[in-house]
Image (cartoon, helix red, strand yellow):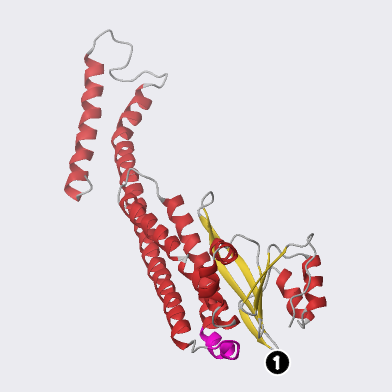
Amino acid sequence: MTTPQVNEQLNVETLTWNGLTWVNIVPPTDQEIEYLAQNYPFHRLDLDDCLSRIQRPKIDEYKEYLFFVLHFPVWRKKTRVAIYSQLSAFIGENYIVTLHAGDIKPLVKLFRDCQLNKESRQKNFGYGSGYLLYRIIDRAVDAYFPVLDKILSLMEAVEDRVFDEKIETAQELHILRRDIITQRRIVFPMRAVVAQMESKVRRFTSTDMSPYFGDLLDHINKQCESLDDSQEVIEIYKDSDFVLSTYHLNRVTRFLTILGSITLPFLVVASIFGMNVALPGGAQTDSYLPLLFLLVIMLAFAGGMLYFFHRRGWI
């Protein structure tokens, strides 16, 4: 199959070496989709899927080519929550076409390395389009490990904050929990697709791909296990934070309740003698004895309540 001519106005880059052509489209639009429809035997529904934002990872197999949709997590430093980036790929006998938004950095870097470095082209183009597809996915999967390391470091940091009652950690736990759930939703479906790849791309490579895709699947399984462990731990942190916050709130509530109970006799006695009626020991006398008498009564009530609370074990 000859390499089609590319209009310079299209977001299409091509790289051909040793009879294998890599067509990289960043980002795909209707014009690029029409270019592919005119020059390649791709089904129209597959081309439409390249522009869709609701696709799930999948493999579509045809007589002349395979069509893949994969999602990779892209971590946003500002929001501290990952989003998914879609990679669509067509693989044929002597070509591979990749379509993505450009935020899968390992894929962008691999294409640039192959453009500029002959050794990189020999390493990645040497065993056919099936092997090149493996190299693309392997780069993207390995680049996810630093993101997992970032999650683990954040979990270590939040662990110390959870058990410090002076620091509020509810928001941090919510952000971290949301990020882990999002990344699980991205990574887990990819595992099923990668498990089927080796048997599908076997006809498009000149070497045995079983060890390569086995190693790739092992990496994805490790990532899934790490995300599972992280979710379990963050749920424990969330529950611990809730229990500690409730305990702290109960302590404050108990203190305020005891304080209010102790001051209640003061209010009752003061209210009685504050009425504008004649009472024994009231304001009609000029002696300080009534005031001392009232203070003694109030302190006696307060002391009795403190003794009662202490006997009950409340203070």
Q: Is 313 in front, or is 159? A: 159
- Residue 88 falls in image quadrant: bottom right
- Residue 233 falls in image quadrant: bottom left
Count of residue discs: 1
Residue to which mark 1 is pinned = 63
> Where residue 130 appears, x then y in whole percent?
57, 83
Which residue lies at the image location 46% right of the left edge and 78% below the top edge?
216
- Mark 1 crowdedness (10 Å alpha carbons): few <14, some 14-19, many ≥20: few
Q: Does 201 appear above or below 272? A: below
Which residue lies at the image location 34% right of the left edge and 58% below the top edge?
240
> Where residue 173 appears, x then y in whole percent?
43, 55
On whether residue 203 falls in the magenta region, the answer is yes
- The chief SS type of the magenta part is helix
181 left or right of 93 in image: left
Which residue lies at the image location 26% right of the left edge and 17% below the top edge?
291
Picture quarter with the N terminus: bottom right
Q: Is 21 in front, or is 71? A: 21
Picture quarter with the C terminus: top left
- Which residues are the magenta region? 195-206
- Residue 294 falls in image quadrant: top left
Label 1 residue SS: loop
Residue 242 visible to the viewer: no
On whether residue 275 falls in the magenta region, the answer is no
290 left or right of 238 in image: left
Which residue lies at the image location 36% right of the left edge and 59% below the top edge?
237
Q: Does 293 appear above or below 232? A: above
User: Disc 1 residue type?
Assistant: Lys
Residue 105 visible to the viewer: yes
